[in-house]
Amino acid sequence: MHRVWAVARNTISQGIRMRVAAVVIVLLLVLLPLMGLTAVGDRTLLGRLQTFVSYGLSLTSLLLCLLTVFVAVYTVTDDIKRHHIFLVVCKPIRRYQIVLGKLLGVVALDAMLLAAFGAIIYGLAWGMLYTADAPEPQVRQARQEFFTSRVRLDTKIDMDHLQAQILQEYNRLKSEGRIPEGMTRQRALGILRSEALNIAKSVPPGYAKEWTFQNVRVSDPNTPLFVRYKLRALPSPVDDQVFSQWRVGDFRTRDATGRLTGNAVPRYVVRRDPLRTFVELSVPSSAVADDGYVAVAYFNDPSRNACTVIPEEVQLLYRSGTFTGNFLRALLMIFSRLLFLAAVGVCVSTWLSFPVAILICMAAFVTGTVNGFIVDSLDLVEGALSLLYTFTIKPLLWLLPKFDGDYNPTRFIVEGRAIGWGFLGQVYLTTGLIKAGLLVLLGVLIFHQRELAKTAV
């Protein structure tokens, strides 16, 4: 192990001496405090914090990913190009120990830099809270919605039942000859699915819609719940705002007249909300029943709204931990990216030149950043191309990391949403252990068989 660590120490020193490392360090030291001072957001304290941490974590992740790629590739290719590797392989050290030492050095350098700049972002965020000249309601909102760690429960539609209705409607239209000529079956089903989802979510004037949540366990009865939602309207009002009326509680117990007798909020909370923007409604935790059941209802008052309202992505959030622990898990998710890119860089640099290895690493990074978009787009491929995609491209995409969607830790921190240890463990199992491990193994095998120099006679 001391041989691996000796190579790792040399790699750390080599990486620190690189100009690109100095540029990255200086940029982050200058830009992070500057962003903390200039962040505006929606001009509220919560908006400023969300903007700063979002851009700060994203910038730190981006620059450290680029630095990881350059250091991982350079440290191997430069040693081979300048024949420094000859001074190492002639010593009592195995080639796999060289590869592991290079990887360990890059990862250790990443860990130190990520911890340092993560601490800067963390300190600046708390500093903004205590030094901001903001009204008390904004400070309270920032503590409840940002400096927290909340479990998010999503509403779900019975897709099996909906899919059966869609197929039934498609067969009816096809038997009546109402499917346009030339339209594929998948295209027609897609249109019908979109229409059915809109109908399932819609609340016409005078109607109400209800969502239920199970197993809501509030640890502190003094902390509120939050209903998070985004609204659309058809037709859209001129001012892009609608009246919202919400009731949250236990709707299972009613008297003979149908009136609620449980722990529901006794009246609707009337709000005026902007369209196409996520907003949060604070609700007392007493709305949750003893068995963890809680229901959320929306009523579209015809005296206030003349349009059909479509609540989208209705979510229930409740506190489950601290901001500090959640921020630490966000940094660990970023570190999983760096671990994978370090493995890619070390692997390809054992058999490729510096420019080609950099190109492959950057392609892996960019593809991982838009992985979800690529997968969703290719899932729409039909016919013979669909089989080709399933057995060729799709397995390759699985080997690439996922940096977007739920694998983007910035979204969790901005929304005050908890990153679970189970989910974090899954990320490290797939990205850090399986995928990165396979790449390191491939790099070891190639480097073991590679001829570094020919004997001249």
Image (cartoon, helix red, strand yellow):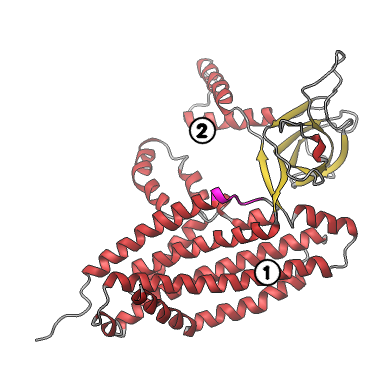
- Residue 358 sits above or below residue 283 on the image: below
Q: Name the residue under label 1.
A: 121
Q: Which of 170 and 22 is in front in this view?
A: 22
Return the residue nearer the eye: 432 or 361.
432
**Residue drawn at point x = 89 percent, y = 31 percent:** 267
Depicted 407 relative to depicted 66: above or below: above
Mark 1: which amino acid? Ile
Query: Pointer 1: residues within 10 angstroms few (<14), some, or many (20+)?
Result: many
* 403 drawn magenta: no
Q: Is residue 449 left or right of residue 80?
A: left
Horizontal side, residue 32 vs residue 341: left or right: right
Residue under the point 48% across and 57% down: 368
Asked if marks 2 and 1 touch (Cβ < 8 Å), the reply is: no
When asked about the image quadrant of residue 212, the answer is top right
> Foreground mark, 2 or 1?
1
* For marks 2 and 1 on the same chain, the one whose residue lies earlier in the sequence: 1
Residue at left 85%, top 23%?
A: 261
For the N terminus, the image quarter is: bottom left
Tag 1 secondary structure: helix
The answer to whether residue 455 is left or right of residue 291 is left
Label 2 sits on a secondary structure element that is helix
Q: Which amino acid does label 2 sit on?
A: Arg
Q: Bounds of the magenta span? A: 418-423
Q: Name the residue under label 2.
A: 187
Measured in 3D between alpha carbons, the distance from the residue under mark 2 to the one under mark 1, in whole angstroms, is 46 Å
The one nearer the camera, 376 or 79, is: 79
Determine whether 272 is above or below 24 in the image: above
**Is 209 on the left-hand or right-hand side of 361?**
right
Residue visible at 53% across and 29% down?
188
Would you call the spot at circle 2 few (<14 residues within 10 Å), some (14-19), or many (20 or more)? few
* Residue 420 in magenta stretch: yes
